[in-house]
Image: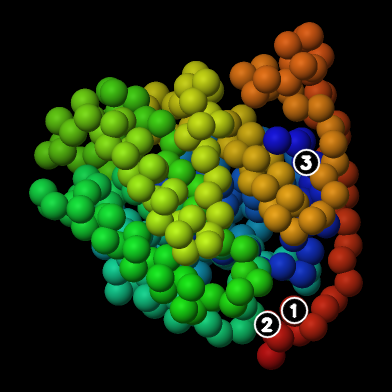
Amino acid sequence: MDIFKSSDMTRIICDKFVVIIGDSIQRAIYKDMVLLLQTERYMTDRELRSKGEISTNGDELVEGGCRGEMSNGVSYREVRQYRTNAHLVRFYFVTRCYNSYIESILSDLQKEPFPDLVIINSCLWDITRYGRDAIEDYKDNLVKLFSRFSETLRPECLVIWNTTLPISSSARGGFLVPEIEFMTTTLRLDILEANFYAQGVATKYGFDILDLHFYLRHQLHRRVRDGIHWDMIAHRQITNIILTHVCESWNIPIPKRPVTFGSYGSSHARNGHYQRMEKPQEQTTCGLSQFMNNINQ
């Protein structure tokens, strides 16, 4: 993992269409990436916890959220988008890795502008909120999802399935409505099984796996009180991990700044050297391209 500044972020995804799909953790990944496009500060707790708001850090609520029914149900929808002359980042909230709503998203992505990068995860809702056969259904749906990705996305689109993060044995709130709170005792093991299975399916279909569960397994102190979600520092680490993977996949030079987190095995961190965040720099300007012209048409 490398350390990325705002100027790096704007350079890496300049003239790119990035799509992030998943639950509230994926939404926080989207929010931190949008924030890093503009500044190097961390998200505030309010930004991290909010859902369905009209706008945050210059993005817009396209569909659902507070424009519709705000709930913790499986039918909740939220589509967000951040757009400039050089960047387009979109988020879709989903509660199942494959269903008719995913098909509608795939229909969107088959129209211009075509996505250059898709980052996706769906697991916690899938295996807790869809009945007694939820885990077997989840396995079947993963196969359907990656099969449909192969059929609908362009070959040059980079698809990254990031694994589900560790949760606490005493997790509460969010998707864990009172009726299923008893599942928390085994849910951690179910997540390990789900991650292992997803890795096999994604690899079979030629898509990338980013094992965030592995990277954050020693960062459990970064989980917030509900035992499910993660704090703003953890999410900046996640953004750095994703950007490192993207750079390696697209053969883009990485900044090669020292890793600052001791649990990642950094010699700098072990020796007590820590990276200081510099003052945010102005966003680099990328020229208007045919990509954005197509959007405006």
Q: Are marks 2 and 1 in contact (CB under 8 Å)?
A: yes
Q: How is the image coloured?
A: rainbow
The residue at which mark 2 appears reads as: 295
Inspect this view and state whether residue 5 appears.
yes
Q: Residue at x 71, y 68 (%)?
A: 16
* Vertical order, 96 against 297 (above or below): above
Between label 2 and label 3, give the one nearer the viewer. Answer: 3
Among the 4 quarters of the image, the one containing residue 147? bottom left
Which type of secondary structure does the marked residue at label 1 adopt? helix
The spot of residue 10 in percent (x, y) is 79, 56
Q: Amino acid at mark 3?
A: Phe
Residue drawn where x is 32% and y is 56% of the image: 95
- Which residue in the protein does label 3 denote? 4
* Nearer to us in this view, 36 or 214: 214
Left or right: residue 150 versus residue 234 is left
Residue that numbered label 1 is attached to: 292
Answer above or below: position of 146 versus 39: below
Q: Amino acid at mark 1?
A: Met
Give the side of residue 198 with respect to residue 112, left or right: left
Q: Position of residue 170 (x, y in %)?
A: 28, 23
Sequence-wise first label, 3 or 1: 3
The location of residue 124, given as percent across then percent down, is 32, 45
Q: How packed is label 1: few (under 14 Cα within 10 Å), some, or many (20 or more)?
A: many
Q: How many marks?
A: 3
Residue at the extreme front of the image, as rendered: 204
Cα gap from disc 2 to disc 3, whole angstroms: 28 Å
